[in-house]
Amino acid sequence: MQATEFLNILGADFFVGVPDSQLRALCDALMERYGNHAPHIIAANEGTAAGIAAGHYLATGRSPLVYLQNSGEGNIVNALASLLHEKAYAIPLIFVIGWRGEPGVKDEPQHAYQGEVTLPLLELLQVEHFVLAKETRGEDVRAAMERFRSSLEAGRSVAFVVRKGALTHDTKVSYKNGYRLRREEAIRTILDAADESDVFVSTTGKASRELFELREERGEGHERDFLTIGSMGHSSSIALGIALEEKGRRTWCLDGDGAFLMHMGAAAVIAAAKPSNFCHVVLNNEAHESVGGMPTAASSIDFPALARALGYAAAQRAKDGEELAAALEEMKGQAGSCFLEVRCAVGSRADLGRPTIPPKANKLAMMRFLGL
């Protein structure tokens, strides 16, 4: 089904969400039609998206569309249960949810359980839903919206759960920025600057994939790296937990701008904890690259100034390989928590692979490296 036809049938006049590769056609259609400004807002996380949508409803009385990957269902549980639900404020939203890890459909390990519980979770939260498949026709969506009408009028949210390939769009929007440094080259430079005893926690998406392949290229093992292939936005918290216990070694967090923004409060906790062995690197390409490249809000943020205001001991920015090498050299002599923003281009190698070790094996290898 064409994404534009789907949007027209739903009839919403405001759109907010977090990008998803399963919803790439929908995201491209929204960006072509509106760009990244009202009535279309790309939110930092799904809970924030639900809050923005609730505000729109309060101001207009009209139900907006909120799009997200099913991994983001966890981020909207609180909003659904304590804000939107008819036993609270009865604010009806229209959710469009990309179904990663659908049972019987091959996907990455981090999506397996989330895929199993996607529909049961909606049922538990009393969200009436319709599954959109490749064979779904416009009249099917119209009929679903007609069935949903009584729920929406009663203040209950509804959802369309989108299977792989169910939505299409004739063109793919191309995203880029003005930076030239490739993220993979930045990670390579950081690995060169690290000591053999250092450990890395990398964020979900292509940064972890590149870190894995760089270790392979260098003939090194993966026991020093925790690849956070799910739980977007939590890699810095995981890294802090390690750093506080492993005070004799340096802990690096390789973060992304979208992941950093998703749970930005973690940075305040890191700074307040004052770990002396923590290096927080934000690889900023101003994009949700792993799910299509839609922009984040990072272009309007001075990350080093933010880090200093939060209380990091030192904060720097690098825009090219020379500046990155110099910043890393300076960080070696700094005490306290360090923050480094690396401005990177959008894009990766066409042949970039995925980690070939299971998540549990990754966990056990790092724990053994840490002496457990």
Image: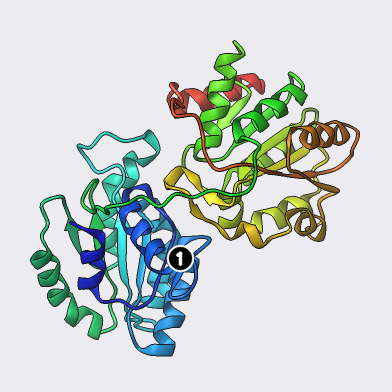
On the image, which quarter does residue 90 sit in? bottom left
- Which residue sits at x=60%, y=42%? 345
- Which residue sits at x=32%, y=78%? 92
Farthest residue toward the top? 219
| 23 lies left or right of 294 | left
- Which residue sits at x=27%, y=52%? 170
Q: Residues within 10 Å of mark 1 (few under 14, many from 20)?
A: some
Q: Residue 268, can we see it? A: yes
Q: Hey, what amino acid is under mark 1? A: Gly
Is 107 or 30 nearer to us in this picture?
A: 30
Q: Work out whether 71 lies above or below 222.
A: below
Q: Position of residue 306 (x, y in %)?
A: 76, 59
Number of marks in the rendered image = 1
| 56 lies left or right of 7 | right
Q: Work out whether 171 lies above or below 107.
A: below
Q: Look at mark 1 in the image and give the residue it sits on.
A: 35
- Which residue sits at x=73%, y=43%? 319
Q: Position of residue 341 (x, y in %)?
A: 72, 46
Is 204 or 121 nearer to us in this picture?
A: 204
Q: Work out whether 122 lies above or below 178.
A: below
| 43 lies left or right of 68 | right
The color scheme shown is: rainbow
Q: Position of residue 225 (x, y in %)?
A: 60, 27
| 290 lies left or right of 109 | right
- Identify the image quadrant of the C terminus: top right
- SS at badge 1: loop
